[in-house]
Amino acid sequence: MVLAETRKAAESVIEAFMGLKANIMVQEYIKEAGGADIRCFVIGDRVIAAMKRQAQEGEFRSNLHRGGSASLVRITPEERKTAVAAAKAMGLNVAGVDLLRSERGPLVMEVNSSPGLEGIEVATGKDIASMIIQFIEKNAKEKRTRTRGKG
């Protein structure tokens, strides 16, 4: 991930990667997010847990494995609705949806189909793995086996 602080810098970075024939994704930098994002854990049609991830001083990426910190956060109804809609749009029953708080409202940064559990379980004190299993058990279709009798 590369942060380009000006339009000219962004153009240079994009040209360099295109020269390498690399696949790239360009994402708008949301300054007001302040190096923080919100990971919403969605199961079915509910956000069952949310945490705020804050980047280290001088870093813009809030990933926990990069030294970011995690804390419990209360999300707004609009953030909850956005997270659930993002998971549904991707066809996912279980997802980690990363949001940025912006002046325009919540913005979806990423929808992860296999989000890690450790950080959010520690931050929220919730046993999310068990919640996933309960969801699967409740929503799994019964498999029926037909047997033929002799006769």
Image (cartoon, rainbow, N blue to C red):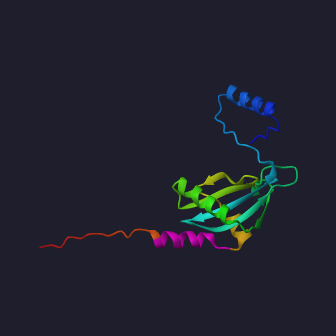
**Residue 143: image x %, image y %?**
36, 68
Image quarter of residue 128: bottom right
For the magenta stretch, what is the residue range?
A: 126-138
User: Looking at the image, which residue is at 58% across and 73% down?
Assistant: 130
Which residue sits at x=59%, y=59%? 95
Q: Residue at x 70, y 65 (%)?
A: 76
Q: Is residue 129 magenta?
A: yes
* Residue 6 sits in quarter: top right
- Classify the position of the C terminus by image quarter: bottom left
Give x and y (percent) for residue 123. 74, 69
Q: Is residue 150 or residue 62 the one in the foreground? A: 62
**Principal secondary structure, stretch drawn in magenta:** helix
Nearer to me, 32 or 103: 103
- Above or below, comparing residue 3 to residue 90 in the picture: above
Check the image and name the residue furthest to the top. Answer: 19
Judge whether residue 113 can be spotted in this image: no
Q: Nearer the viewer, residue 102 or 39?
A: 102
Q: Is residue 5 left or right of residue 81?
A: right
Where does residue 66 sit, x and y in percent of width and height?
Answer: 78, 53
- Tell me if residue 31 is in the magenta stretch: no
Seen from this angle, which residue lies furthest right? 57
Q: Residue furthest left?
A: 151
> Which one is in front, 144 or 91?
91
